[in-house]
Image (tube, rainbow, N blue to C red):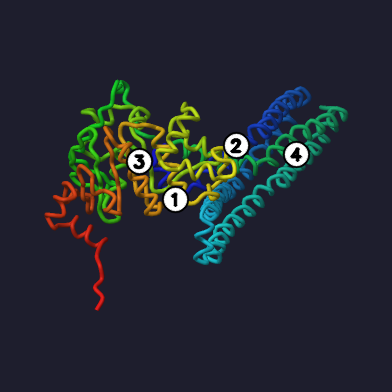
Amino acid sequence: MPLRYFDGTTHGEVLSRITNDVDTINQTLNQSMTQIVTSVVTMIGVLVMMFSISWLLTVVTLIILPLSVVFISIIVKNSQKYFKQQQEYLGHVNGHVEEMYGSHVVMKAFNGEQRSVEKFDQSNNVLYKAAWKSQFLSGMMMPIMTFIGNLGYVVVCILGGYLAVRNAITVGDIQAFIQYVRSFTQPITQIANISNTLQQTAAAAERVFEFLNEAEENPETTKPVKLTTVQGSVEFKDVHFGYSPEKIIINDFCATVKPGQKIAIVGPTGAGKTTMVKLLMRFYDINSGSILVDGHNIKEFSRQDLRQMFGMVLQDAWLYNTTIMENIRYGRLDASDEDVISAAKIAYVDHFIRTLPDGYNMVLDEEASNVSQGQKQLLTIARAILADPRILILDEATSSVDTRTEVLIQKAMDNLMKNRTSFIIAHRLSTIRNADLILVMNNGDIVEQGTHKELLARNGFYSSLYNSQFETTEVF
């Protein structure tokens, strides 16, 4: 699935389809399907025995089937929409709960409990109403089917008595036939009894297949390019891109990056800096134009081979529920413990790890809240160092680190960036003074490019950005 889908759909909604909806289908296939098959086979066998006793009584008995179908179709038609609404709002409730639980610190910090509860109650009330209406309507099936089945008994008794008086059938056959009628209507009643499960399954299956029918990532090329050595040259040619076709946010983006260059991308918030990185790694495909790596269009590579060329440190540090050693090793899964420790030393994180209770074997909790935000970022930098890529992408990599640590990391990064192409997205312009090329972006376009000294000398957009961070207030 493309990232576009997950950016536009809540995590709880996706999880609800994969867990609740799939589990509903699973239970039906394990339990109800067996009962349906048994009921159908029983009905066929009983029908054969009924015809062997009296074809006339059997035909009369079968007349109740169309009546049953009419009632069942009326109930299903009215209840199915509520089953569908029930599964839909179950996803909404799960999405809200997952979102609130994932950011409960922010929610409490801004006193959002009441608003959160109100939103939950709103979705939960719709879920409650849909659930009881669907269960009530489907629950009516069994008594209705029992009533229709009893009508069959009455018809058989009256017609059987008439035939017995005329010596067309014996009383024993009538008694046996009534038993068969009971055996014939019982499976129908059983199927009606599990109809609520079947309808819920139908609604769940619709959501699952809707998920499966979502547009998938553009297919990989059949003959991907395989580079023996990656030089690290990157070229953007007339790149146009928009998250929606109606709103293009990157216009005519052109830039040439030579192997080993240190490229800084700066600009105000919303200028399109992070978007360019997403396009470079093919998290999104561009609308038009081309992006070349070592002279090859990135679409000519498989996504796995393309992303293997890059090492990435994001503004949002992501760590998972395992040891610090394994979190760093995520950058290169076959790395030895010595390689991990070496990468940690280069990232100036080794000392901090050794002060922890279990050192490298300390297990991070589910949200990695037992280390600070700055320490998390240091660990992700160590992970990128361990990956040893040809092209580095640092998206505000030092935003959560104190100034002293930032200086240390800057030295480590300078060593790491030697002979590697590096893309640095930074708001603190002091960190990118020694960049080989600075691309200044605004509203999806490169408005200026050059070195730090050249851009300051022009006294343009970059100069105003830079000076705004170092303005001093005169004291009178």
Q: Residue at x 60, y 43 (%)?
A: 200
Q: Secondary structure at mark 1?
A: helix
Identify residue for label 4: 152
Disc 4 + disc 3, Cβ < 8 Å: no
Q: What separation in Å lies between label 2 and label 4 (alpha carbons)? A: 34 Å
Task: Name the quarter where the C terminus is drawn.
Answer: bottom left
Q: Which mark is residue 412?
A: 3
The kind of residue on which mark 4 rests is Gly
Identify residue type, mark 1: Gly
Mark 1, residue position = 374
- Residue 25 is labelled as 2
**Residue 198 in which image quadrant:** top right
Q: How many neighbours does mark 4 have within 10 angstroms: few (below 14), some (14-19), or many (20 or more)?
A: many
- SS class, disc 2: helix
Who comes first in sequence, dot 4 or dot 1? Answer: 4
Type of amino acid under label 3: Ala
Which class describes the residues within 10 Å of circle 1: few (<14), some (14-19), or many (20+)?
Answer: some
Marks 3, 1: nearer the viewer: 3
Sequence-first disc among 4 and 3: 4
The amino acid marked with disc number 2 is Ile
Q: Earlier in the sequence, mark 2 or mark 4?
A: 2
Label 3 crowd (10 A; few <14 / some 14-19 / many >=20): some
Lower position in the chain sequence, tag 1 or tag 2: 2
* SS assignment at label 4: helix
Residue 354, percent from left and from top: 53, 42
Residue at (55% x, 38% y) in the render = 323
